[in-house]
Amino acid sequence: MSLSIERLSVAYGARKVLNDLSLPALPSGSLVALVGPNGAGKSTLLRALAGLEPMQGRLSLEGQDVARLAFAERARRLSYMPQQLPPGIALGVLESIIAGLRVSGAEQPAALAFEALRQLGIEHLAEQMLNSLSGGQKQLVALAQLLARNPQVLLLDEPTSALDLHYQLRVMDAVRERVHGQRLLAIAVLHDINLAASHADILVMLSQGRIVACGTPHEVLQPELLAEVYGVEARVERCSRQRLQVLVDRALP
Amino acid sequence: MTQALSADAAQAASRYRRLLWRRTWLVLGLAVLLVLAVLGDLASGASGMGLGQLLHGVFDPGSLSATERVIIWNVRLPYALMAVLVGAALSLAGAEMQAILDNPLASPFTLGVSSSAALGASLAIAYPLGVAWLAPSLQVTLMAFIFACLSVLLLQFMARLRGAGVQSLVLFGIALVFSCNALVSLLQLLATEDVLQQLVFWTMGSLARADWNKLGMLAVVLLLVTPFSLRAAPAMTLLRMGEDRARSFGVDTRRLRHASLLRISLLSATAVAFVGTIGFIGLVGPHIARMLVGEDQRFLLPASALVGALLLALSSIASKLIMPGVIVPVGIVTALVGVPVFVALVFRRGRNL
């Protein structure tokens, strides 16, 4: 299974947000991070993939044109996770996942929902109210909502923004584990370039609505590119555990 | 998922089933309370006719004097049933509004649906169309209905404007309330004394306008709308977790909103057109229901309808007891009771968020 993007464009009126993007086929079993400065079009690209923005171009999943899929079928196969669950909802954790399963007509939704929670190691939260959870726990629940529906592609919009260090890692570890274990494809917008470097298999760097680099973190993260795209002077070094680290020294004038 | 479900998961599923049963019982309990309140409503009134006498009269009309018959069939029964239907309609409309506009302060009253209905009705009262085939009272109802629908459409339009957030929507609703009230006042200023009396009376929501035709129409609207509401309930539960999330789960939120707005217009416009402005039921009903059964809309929607009906039935009893011998328009009662509840809600919300 792979997802390929050919000549994708998104425009708001006359303003082109994404301009003619093409990517080599993204294979299942990989975690793809979309990185780039603010306003580069990362979230728009993700939303376009999810069918939330009108787009031009061709998107194919397993060689099949995604635009031809029925709305519900597309939603089942490509599952999108918005940044955060809104506050103030009087729903329990388990029933919030069941609600997602019910609209797609799954059998035994309660048991499936529980399994999804367990696979993320948060089954003890099943009977709590969403409102009583921390931001990180909520994000894991949101991930469980997605995973319970058994999608092929996970589209995650800044899944770790507003999370503390512990939950940044837990959410990204959970995503990576599921992606590798179940041969899913995950595409995540990530702000933290080091988190992207440590967790992603493929980095796609966007700038001003165009793709400027695509490859392994090692290939993409080059000081010259970071200077050009982000306007920073940075070093890319391996730490004592051989992990790639981007060390930003200063903003370029 | 193909693997066999574990014992834990089966247990979680059975606990969830028990939760659903508990909610079902709560909803049924509300229905029982409602029946009791309606009996209380039937039993109270200026004529002093008791419940036993009244029920006896209903099942054996031959035993009644003419006066008693009028009291039972033209006053007590229509009042009590109207309270139930209007309360249910307003509260159900409020619950749907709060869900689709993602706003806990949304209700037909606070967002100006009632006020625009009042404006429509006032226009029809002050300047009746000279059409023979449309009775004046029907014209009033029809105009109230049309204006209520227009206000919902306006709200929908505002909600769609880019950058119009939750706050600005509420502000827009308040603006609508004030503008409509101002225009109604203007009509009142220009009206003759006779018309003025009708105008003022209309704007005070009152069950005294109840009759069997209106009851029938409102019942039909409720019966028509409720199945569609319940069918949309699972998708609305998802919508509560965010528009994008619902869409990405395969919910066509545009269609959901449009259908829901249609239901809201029908419910609130019919209710308001028949009895005038009755505030706060549509706001408070869903909130009380939410505290009882949570936000699974399959339970919240029926519970909201029942709580609304219960509140209005209780208000109707109160409206007869406040001043002996006088039936205070029930709109005044709900506003008086509603204001403290509203304030309490705002404070509670302030703490939680």
Image (spheres, coloured by chain):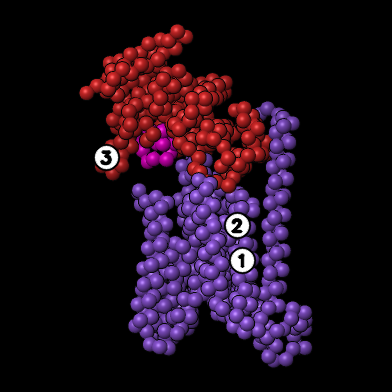
- Res A203 → quadrant: top left
Q: In the depicted view, which residue is nearer to us: B216 or B312?
A: B312
The picture's colour for chain A is red
Residue A161, x across and y down, in percent: 44, 31
Q: Amino acid at mark 1?
A: Leu
Q: Identify the residue position indicated by label 1 in the image.
A: B311
Binning the other alpha carbons within 10 Å of mark 3 as few (below 14), some (14 to 19) or many (20 upward) gives few
Q: CA distance from mark 2 to mark 1?
A: 10 Å
The picture's colour for chain B is purple
User: Residue B159: in sight, yes or no?
Assistant: no
Q: Amino acid at mark 2?
A: Ile
Q: Say which residue appears at 70% left-offset and 64% top-offset.
A: B33
Q: In the depicted view, which residue is nearer to us: B293 or B59?
A: B293
Magenta stretch contains residue B189: no
Secondary structure at numbered mark 2:
helix
Q: CA distance from mark 2 to mark 3?
A: 46 Å
Residue B1, x across and y down, in percent: 63, 30
Q: Identify the residue position indicated by label 2 in the image.
A: B288
Q: Identify the residue position indicated by label 3 in the image.
A: A15
Q: In this picture, which residue range is highlighted in magenta? A: A45-58
